[in-house]
Image (cartoon, helix red, strand yellow):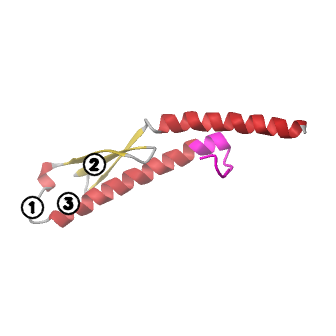
Amino acid sequence: MAGLGKFLKQAQKMQAEMTRVQEELAKREVEASAGGGAVKATARCDGTIVSVKIDPKVVDPKDVEMLEDLILGAVTNALQSAKKTQDEELAKVTAGMNLPGMM
């Protein structure tokens, strides 16, 4: 029974550490761009988009579809980068273990 108690204490400690890391990730930002930097998107590592910046030179009312594609590409890249950062940081806490209910 002592082994179970030790395991539960370790799990509680890991949960507290994961909460701390998730709070940090909610503040950490990553940036991605598309179109050679014409569109830049910034995301937090909790999966929220912070900003989208568009170079005025790429705004062409006759080609809205191209601008939409650039925005979508920049946002997608930013979210992928944020997710990768999140996964890497949480893996440090769990030592690579995939524990259901812990994330």
- Kindly indicate the quadrant of the structure image that contains residue 14: top right
3D distance between C-alphas at marks 3 and 1: 9 Å
Left or right: where 62 falls relative to 14: left
Q: Which residue is mark 2?
A: 40
How crowded pointer 1 is (Cα within 10 Å; few <14, some 14-19, many 20+) is rated as few
Q: Position of residue 81 (x, y in %)?
A: 43, 50
The span shown in magenta is 90-103
User: Helix, strand or loop at disc 2?
Assistant: strand
Q: Is residue 74 above or below residue 21?
A: below
How crowded pointer 2 is (Cα within 10 Å; few <14, some 14-19, many 20+) is rated as many
Asked if the residue under mark 1 is in contact with the one under mark 2, i.e. CB atoms within 8 Å, the reply is: no
Position of the N terminus, as image quadrant, is top right
Q: Position of residue 59 (x, y in %)?
A: 13, 56
- Badge 1 amino acid: Pro
Q: Which residue is mark 3?
A: 67
Residue 61 is marked as 1
Predominant SS of the magenta segment: loop
Left or right: where 69 falls relative to 80: left
Residue found 25% across the figure and 59% down from its top: 70
- Badge 2 amino acid: Lys
